[in-house]
Image (cartoon, grey):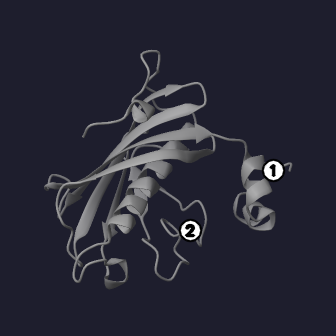
Amino acid sequence: MTRSALTTPPPDAIRPGPLPGAPAPGTPLGSHYSRCFGCGDEHPTGLHLTALTPDGVTVVAEFTVEETHQGAPGLAHGGVLAAAMDEVIGMSVWLFQRPYVTGRLETDYLAPVPVGTVLHLRAWCGGMSGRKAYLEAEGRIGSPDGPVAVRAAALFVEVGMEHFARHGDIQKIADEHHEYEVNP
C-alpha cells in the first residue's frame, strides 16, 4: 500500500506498547456504542464486528459479509469494506485509553469480497505523535492467513469527550460510558 504523507508516521513518532490497565491478551473488546454501525449489536444492518486484542497493541476481528452489505450483485460494497477498516482501526485506538476520531482513511481494494465471506481484520498502530495516531489495517479472506482483500492506513486524532457531547447525544454517551466524565 502506498500511503500519503498524511497517514505516514513522522520520524519522531513513538510506537506504543501495552498500557497499564489495558485489556489482557485475548480479552474481547466491547462495542463503543450499542447502535454503532460498525460494532453495535443493536444496529439492525450493521457490521456487528466483535474484536479482541491478542497482545494489548493489536486488534483482530471478524466480519461476515451479508446481503445487506453488497454493492455489485454478490459482492461487498467498497464503502462497507472501508467502514469495516475504519471500525477495526477505531477499536485499536481504544487500547490507548483515550478518545480518538478518524481524521483520514485511505483504503486499497486488492480483491473482490463475495457475500458470505468471513473477512479477518487486523489493526495496529505504526506510531503516535502528539494528538495524532497513525494506524494500519488489513482484511483477509477466509482465514487470518488468507489472501489480503483490503488494506487501510489512517490518521486518527485524539479529542476530548466534550467533542462527542457537543456534536452527539450527551444522554446516550452518559448512559453507555459511565467510565468517562463528560463536561460539555
How crowded pointer 2 is (Cα within 10 Å; few <14, some 14-19, many 20+) is rated as some
Q: Which mark is residue 36?
A: 2
Q: Residue furthest right?
A: 183
Q: Secondary structure at mark 1?
A: loop
- Name the residue rendered at 36%, 46% in the picture: 123
Q: Callout 1, which amino acid?
A: Val
Evaluate if marks 1 and 2 touch, with contact meaning CB atoms under 8 Å apart: no
Q: Which residue occupies the foreground of this view, 182 or 9?
A: 9
Examine the rendered structure and indicate whether residue 177 appears above or below residue 161.
below
- Name the residue rendered at 31%, 55% in the picture: 121
Number of marks drawn: 2
Q: Tell me which label, 1 or 2, sits earlier in the chain.
A: 2
- Name the residue rendered at 22%, 72% in the picture: 117
Asked whether residue 72 appears in the rendered view, the answer is yes
- x and y percentages locating residue 67 in the rendered image: 31, 84
Q: Which residue occupies the foreground of this view, 48 or 85?
A: 85
Asked whether residue 22 appears in the rendered view, the answer is no
- Name the residue rendered at 32%, 63% in the picture: 62
Q: Secondary structure at mark 2?
A: loop
Residue 76 shown left or right of residue 182 in the figure: left
How crowded pointer 1 is (Cα within 10 Å; few <14, some 14-19, many 20+) is rated as some
Task: Give the residue pinned by disc 1.
Answer: 182
- x and y percentages locating residue 134 in the rendered image: 45, 34
Q: Callout 2, which amino acid?
A: Cys
Q: Quadrant of residue 132?
A: top right
Examine the rendered structure and indicate whether residue 33 appears above or below residue 109.
below
C-alpha span from label 1 to label 2: 19 Å
Q: Quadrant of residue 130?
A: top right
Q: Which mark is residue 161?
A: none
In the rendered view of the protein, which quadrant contains the N terminus?
Answer: top left
Residue 94 shown left or right of residue 77 in the figure: right
- x and y percentages locating residue 159 in the rendered image: 67, 41
